[in-house]
């Protein structure tokens, strides 16, 4: 699958990428979260922490990096701020509240909408070809596994006939795989029945503490003049207030010129979090 050209002045973020594998018996893993992030919430960030705990306790992977990949403006959805604001908020959140998460603006700053399969190919290319993967303490080269981190609604949409194309399902679940954050009200077992061919690449993570904070609810609170503190990282709240964001949750930022299908509109929402975080 060919990749679009990178945006002008683009550099793949790797300042928090762990280039040395701590345990040589493990497989290096990068987690990629795709979504609107309008705005980024504590739930978005918490998903990565839940995934790391699960990986450490239940798999043979070792997480070497985690990335938020905000969707392109051509996604065209009410409440979707410009890519610049969303990338800024994600960057503020990760840089000031995390020691290992990063934001990759490649998808956000493309000239058109990019399918999830293409986004994962981009990460695989940057990490394994450009950066050259990782090495063990003894200097042995290791290829990094790239996997999608998403909410349980993603699996539900993937199991519905006609929502995702068969080639994209094979590419995402067969080549890469996914970690799914489960939430109450979603029948994961039923959803995964039709995805049996990729069951070995689907890891289900249970939320031990339920969190239903969503970007949609946050935007509603802001429009109504209600406080959103402690729902979002404090620096993100300050950024929203300083820039007067979400006071009018109206039309999208740009026209849908990319011609992406309904399946991608559904999938990006589902990928962003286990609750409705669009």
Image (spheres, rainbow, N blue to C red):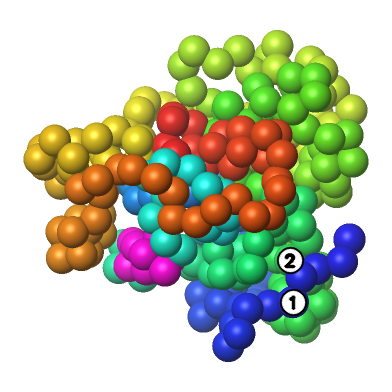
Magenta stretch: give its range.
Answer: 84-93
Return the x and y of residue 258 as percentages of the image width and height. Answer: 68, 54
The residue singled out by tag 2 in the image is: 122
Q: Nearer the viewer, mark 1 or mark 2?
A: 1
Return the x and y of residue 31 as percentages of the image width and height. Answer: 61, 54
The correct choice, above or below, for 19 with respect to 163 in the image is below
The correct choice, above or below, for 204 with respect to 85 in the image is above
Residue 91 part of the magenta segment: yes
What numbered label is drawn on residue 5?
Answer: 1
Tell me what residue is drawn at x 39 percent, y 45 percent.
251
Residue 229 versus residue 21: which sits nearer the camera?
A: 229
SS assignment for the magenta stretch, majority: helix
The correct choice, above or below, for 95 with respect to 190 in the image is below
Return the x and y of residue 224 as percentages of the image width and height. Answer: 13, 35
Tell me what residue is drawn at x 48 percent, y 43 percent.
77
Residue 172 image-quadrant placement: top right
Return the x and y of residue 73 as percentages of the image width and height. Answer: 52, 57
């Amino acid at each position: 699958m060919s990749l679009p050209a990178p945006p002008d002045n683009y550099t793949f973020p790797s300042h928090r990428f762990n280039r040395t594998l701590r345990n040589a018996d493990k497989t290096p893993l990068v987690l990629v979260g795709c979504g609107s992030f309008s705005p980024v919430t504590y739930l978005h960030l918490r998903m990565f922490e839940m995934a790391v705990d699960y990986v450490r306790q239940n798999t043979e992977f070792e997480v070497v990096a985690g990335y938020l990949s905000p969707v392109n403006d051509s996604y065209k959805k009410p409440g979707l701020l410009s890519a610049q604001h969303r990338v800024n908020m994600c960057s503020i959140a990760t840089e000031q509240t995390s020691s290992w998460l990063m934001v990759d603006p490649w998808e956000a700053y493309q000239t058109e909408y990019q399918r999830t399969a293409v986004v994962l190919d981009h990460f695989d290319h940057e990490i394994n070809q450009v950066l050259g993967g990782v090495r063990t303490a003894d200097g042995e080269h290791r290829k990094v596994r790239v996997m999608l981190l998403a909410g349980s609604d993603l699996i539900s949409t993937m199991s519905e006939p006609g929502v995702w194309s068969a080639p994209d399902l094979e590419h995402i679940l067969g080549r890469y795989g996914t970690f799914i954050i489960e939430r109450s009200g979603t029948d994961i077992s039923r959803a995964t029945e039709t995805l049996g061919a990729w069951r070995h690449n689907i890891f289900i993570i249970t939320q031990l503490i339920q969190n239903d904070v969503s970007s949609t609810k946050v935007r509603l609170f802001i429009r109504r003049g209600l406080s959103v503190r402690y729902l979002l990282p404090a620096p993100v709240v300050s950024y929203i207030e300083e820039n007067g964001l979400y006071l009018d949750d109206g039309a999208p930022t740009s026209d849908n010129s990319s011609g992406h299908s309904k399946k991608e509109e559904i999938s990006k929402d589902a990928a962003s979090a286990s609750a409705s975080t669009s």
